[in-house]
């Protein structure tokens, strides 16, 4: 955090030390870069391909959740079956 503040202050000091023409050009360049960045972010936010990819990711997530629930149910059933088998074997061992 301190480093970024020091860098920003150094940048301001350099700009202040420059001529008015250089300051104006630098300011114009920074504003232009900001507008370009705004346009790029807007383009990405409204890109249909990215929106489609988001929908695909949601669908894959839902399918994975369904598969995991199903696998969990199968594991639960198998565990209950094994517990029942063990219980019956223990009763048979104590009876016989």
Image (cartoon, grey):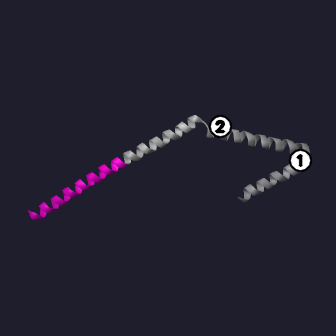
Is 87 situated above or below 36? below
Q: Nearer the viewer, residue 11 or 46?
A: 46
Q: In this view, does 79 lie above or below 62?
A: below
Query: For the residue labelled by badge 1, is the local secondary structure a helix, a strand or a loop?
Result: loop
Mark 2 or mark 1: name the one nearer the start of the chain.
1
The residue range painted magenta reads 69-96
Q: Position of residue 54 (x, y in %)?
A: 53, 41
**Which of the pair 29/53 is nearer the observer?**
53
Quadrant holding the C terminus: bottom left
Task: Please tell me whether residue 94 belongs to the stretch shown in magenta.
Answer: yes
> What's the residue at 73%, 57% (across, down)?
3
Q: How crowded is mark 2: few (under 14 residues within 10 Å), some or many (20 or more)?
A: few
Identify the residue position indicated by label 1 in the image. Answer: 18
Q: Assign the magenta stretch its main secondary structure.
A: helix
Q: Is residue 39 magenta?
A: no
In percent of the image, x 48 and y 43: which residue is there? 58
Q: Relative to 42, is 87 above or below?
A: below
Residue sitting farthest toward the top: 49
Q: Would you say 29 lies left or right of 21 here?
A: left
Q: Residue at x 63, y 39 (%)?
A: 44
* Numbered-mark total: 2
Farthest left residue in view: 96
Q: In which quarter of the image is residue 50?
A: top right
Given this view, does label 2 or label 1 mark the residue nearer the observer? 2
The residue indicated by pointer 2 is 43
Viewer-proximal residue among 61 and 22: 61
The answer to which image quadrant residue 36 occupies is top right
Discs 2, 1 touching: Cβ within 8 Å: no
């Amino acid at each position: 955090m301190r480093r970024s503040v020091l860098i920003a202050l150094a940048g301001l000091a350099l700009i202040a030390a420059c001529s008015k023409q250089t300051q104006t050009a630098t300011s114009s360049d920074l504003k232009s870069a900001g507008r370009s960045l705004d346009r790029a972010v807007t383009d990405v936010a409204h890109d249909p391909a990215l929106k489609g990819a988001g929908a695909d990711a949601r669908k894959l997530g839902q399918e994975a959740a369904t598969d995991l629930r199903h696998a969990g149910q199968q594991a639960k059933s198998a565990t209950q079956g094994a517990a029942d088998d063990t219980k019956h074997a223990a009763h048979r061992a104590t009876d016989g």
